[in-house]
Image (tube, rainbow, N blue to C red):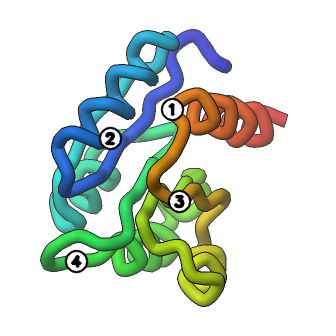
Amino acid sequence: MASQDRVLVVDDNHDICDLVALKLTNSGFGVSQAFDGATALQTARAEAFDLIILDVMMPGMSGLDVLRALRDEAATRSTPVLMLTAKTQERDIEAGFAAGADDYITKPFSPRELLVRVRVILRRGQQ
């Protein structure tokens, strides 16, 4: 992990967003939050992030729509994205990876496992 890897956490559930942000902040990450897809996309375009943790089911713009938009833009195309969602069906997981996700975790989730996966994704990106 670099000295201050930056992570954008996106979830319309403020409690989950806060829990993930707290876990990451306590582990030395710089964290920003967004609570809807449009704000997430705007934030990702305005700032450089080392990782985006993205919910799928959000009002307005879904996480999959956000992910597709991120992958279509040169500035965000290579930013790793970890989907964190209640969508647990195989077809949902396949859709997440097909849209360009780097990893996929279903809710309910273990904050410790999430942290491990975040570190693995970031380590992969530094190789």
Quarter of the figure with the C terminus? top right
The residue at which mark 4 appears reads as: 61
Mark 2 or mark 1, which is nearer to you? 1
Q: Amino acid at mark 3?
A: Thr
- Residue 53 percent location from the top left of the image: 45, 49
Residue appearing at x 21%, y 39% in the figure: 15
Image mark for residue 111: 1
17 left or right of 99 in image: left
Q: CA distance from mark 3 to mark 4?
A: 19 Å
Q: CA distance from mark 3 to mark 2?
A: 27 Å
Residue appearing at x 51%, y 13% in the figure: 27
Dot 1: within a 10 Å radius of its alpha carbon, few (fewer than 14), some, or many (20 or more) residues? few
Say which element carries label 4: loop
Mark 3 or mark 4, which is nearer to you? 3
Say which element carries label 2: loop
Q: Amino acid at mark 2?
A: Glu
Quarter of the figure with the N terminus? top right
Q: Are marks 3 and 1 in contact (CB under 8 Å)?
A: no
The residue at which mark 2 appears reads as: 47
Q: Amino acid at mark 4?
A: Met
The residue at which mark 3 appears reads as: 106
- Residue 48 percent location from the top left of the image: 41, 40
Asked where in the image residue 38 lies, by quadrant, the reply is bottom left
- Residue 96 percent location from the top left of the image: 56, 76
Q: CA distance from mark 2 to mark 1?
A: 25 Å
Q: Are marks 2 and 1 in contact (CB under 8 Å)?
A: no
Q: CA distance from mark 4 to mark 1?
A: 25 Å
Mark 3 or mark 2, which is nearer to you? 3
96 left or right of 122 in image: left
- Nearer the N terminus, badge 3 or badge 4? 4
Say which element carries label 1: helix
